[in-house]
Amino acid sequence: MSSRFGTFLYVPKESREVKSFELTHRSVVGLACVAIGICSLLLGLGAWRLAPVVGGAEPGLASENARLRAQVGRMEGQMASLGKSISGLMGREEELRIVADLPPVPREVQAVGVGGPGHPALETPDVSRDAGLNSRVATVNASVDALVRRSALLSESMSEVRKALAAKKERFSTTPSIWPASGFLSSTFSLHRRHPIFHDIRPHYGIDISARRGAPIVATAAGKVIYAGWENGHGNYVEIDHGHGVVTTYSHASRVLVHVGQKVERGDQVALIGSTGFSVAPHVHYEVHEHGKPVDPLKYIFPDAIAD
């Protein structure tokens, strides 16, 4: 059998000379081999770009995965550190709740920091073809979600503690707790005391503190002056409303130093020791009233809290 398939004639445009070449079996096989080789090369390049190679990913993706793994590793370390910090703050928060006289946070509420399947924040999209890397990213995402919820719980609890402590501080600042003057206790609270001027038995709804004329009389707690002036029997007289139903009064002053509506703090001077009104010697007659009822001031005064 002849190896020739046929003869082809070729006429160039620039020349009238006709050229010819024969298509043989060998030339056909050669062309086929070249075509197959080109196709194989193209398919190989496509497979290199589109399909995983040894190691689980193409070179570019493998480099990106390595970078992601490094970032995830750093985030895992940060999450662990933040978790320890928040746990420490929660321990401190328990102590502050005791100081603020608040009940502990219920266990079921504390469990808010534990994530669960199906939580919206835990639905993490795949970031890589690497299943292990995707799993680590999902774990970090869950940790972030738990830390956010734990920090929100801690913030809410600390806000409650802050308000409770502020209320306690305000209540303490408005509670009469010091002596109204430096001197000595010359008469105590009594429901049956002989009056030094009228010599009859009548209640003594306060305490008397004797001191040098002109010595300062101070407010025993923060409050608002609701009376400042002359009062029959009491002479120069000051009355302070401390809120919470507590009122204090200061009688027999030689001079009043405050005016109605003025706000005072514990220790502020409100008057000077004198002997005005029904009095036989320089002193301050000091009373404490709870919801309109006089009580013994000594139950409020700290033993060593003496005004300077």
Image: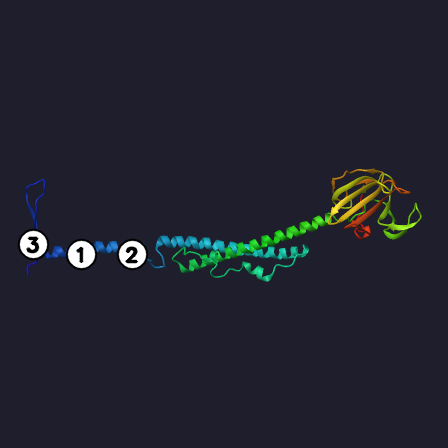
- Closer to the camera, 27 or 12? 12
On-image quarter of the C terminus: top right
Left or right: where does residue 68 sit relative to residue 87?
left
- Closer to the camera, 19 or 303? 303
- Nearer-N-terminus badge (1/2): 1
Q: Position of residue 290 (x, y in %)?
A: 77, 51
User: Where is residue 274, by image quadrant?
Assistant: top right
Q: Which of marks 1 and 2 is in front?
A: 2
- Nearer-N-terminus badge (1/3): 3
- Residue drawn at (77%, 47%) of the image: 247
The residue that disc 1 covers is 33
The residue that disc 2 covers is 47
Left or right: where does residue 216 sit relative to residue 139?
right
C-alpha separation, residue under disc 2 versus residue under disc 3: 39 Å
Say which element carries label 1. Answer: helix
What number of labels is visible?
3
Check disc 2 and give the amino acid type: Ala
Say which element carries label 3. Answer: strand
Label 2 with label 3: CB-CB less than 8 Å: no
Check disc 3 and give the amino acid type: Gly
- Nearer-N-terminus badge (2/3): 3
User: Where is residue 86, by image quadrant?
Assistant: bottom right
Q: Nearer the viewer, mark 1 or mark 3?
A: 3
On-image quarter of the N terminus: bottom left
Check disc 1 and give the amino acid type: Cys
The residue that disc 3 covers is 6
Say which element carries label 2. Answer: helix
C-alpha separation, residue under disc 1 versus residue under disc 2: 21 Å
User: Where is residue 103, by image quadrant?
Assistant: bottom right
